[in-house]
Image (cartoon, rainbow, N blue to C red):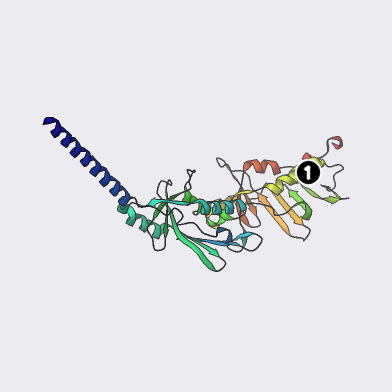
Amino acid sequence: MQRQKNIRLLFSLLGMIALIMALFVFNSVKNNPSVDKGIFQIENLDKVDRVVLQSKNEKTDLSFNGTKWMVNGSHEADRQMIKVLFAALKQIEAKRAVASAIQDSVQKEINTTGIKVSCYEGEVLAKEFWSKGNAQNSETYFQLTDGVPFLVNIPGYRVYVASVFEVPTNDWRDKTVFNFNWQNIRTVEVKFPKNEKQNFRASFQNKIFSIENMKETDTTKLAAFMDALIQLRAERILTAEQSRPYDSLLATNPFQEITVQDIANRSYQLKIFPPQKRKSAGLAIRNEEVIELNPMGLREIYRTKDFFIARGAR
């Protein structure tokens, strides 16, 4: 009799456990509905030829003109950054909807300080969503025009996705300082205002690129110098507001001036200013724009006339 009672109790217990597990699974599915991971992806991403990033303070219009990407129609874009942008658009997945308890606050943040991302195929809007990161820069939320915010990520990478869309307009620009190559060089002139004896001018003489009025040029050193010029890149291109604190420095004489003239008689000028204490980047003016240069790059182009004299001609 007692044994039968124990068996009935055992079955009752098992039934209760099964019911509890069923309720747990039901609630889990209810609270975590299936997510369309590709909700923010673009079906024909390779056909997208324009991406507009609109924040509260500025608008960045990235467009492909048939041969290259442009920033706001007037400056060539950084190719590597465009690759990163499209890699992000291709790989981003929706992880889960933002918890209902914080949806209102996240939506408010997105609407006030988020970035609107508009992707076009010609004149057709292919996809539009808003991007916003959290205060710790550790999570990114995306939201469609008429949807709820989702937590998104790039599978396999621990990256702050929102940073791709938060890049200031000037930082999308190509950072190459001199837009020339060996085939279109006419002359390169380098001046040192405080040491004029070291000024020099290089050009093609008898089909050899060498320094004018120099008995014998070390062409290996000159070629390395020219390669450094061609590869020189700015760390940042400063806006007028960003360069304002350096107005007093930029009003002084530069310690080096480089002017490149191409075969179409276009000139590219770079004025480099003395390094600042406790500042890693060097300041320069390139055709009226203030830029920051990496100290390593600066060392490669700081070459005086004597540096290029061939050893046997000294």
The kind of residue on which mark 1 rests is Leu
Q: Residue at x 80, y 40 (%)?
A: 220
Placement of the C terminus among the 4 image quadrants: top right
Reading the image, the residue beneath label 1 is 222
What element does badge 1 sit on? helix
User: Residue 227: x, y in percent?
Assistant: 73, 45
* Residue 100 can be seen in this image: yes
Front residue of 234 and 214: 234
User: Residue 106: x, y in percent?
Assistant: 36, 55
Placement of the N terminus among the 4 image quadrants: top left
In the image, is 63 to the left or to the right of 12?
right
In the image, is 182 to the left or to the right of 76?
right
Dot 1, how many residues are within 10 Å of its Cα: few (below 14), some (14-19), or many (20+)? some
* Residue 238 can be seen in this image: no
Residue at the far left in the pictured view: 1
Residue at the far bottom in the pictured view: 123
In the image, is 76 to the left or to the right of 142?
right
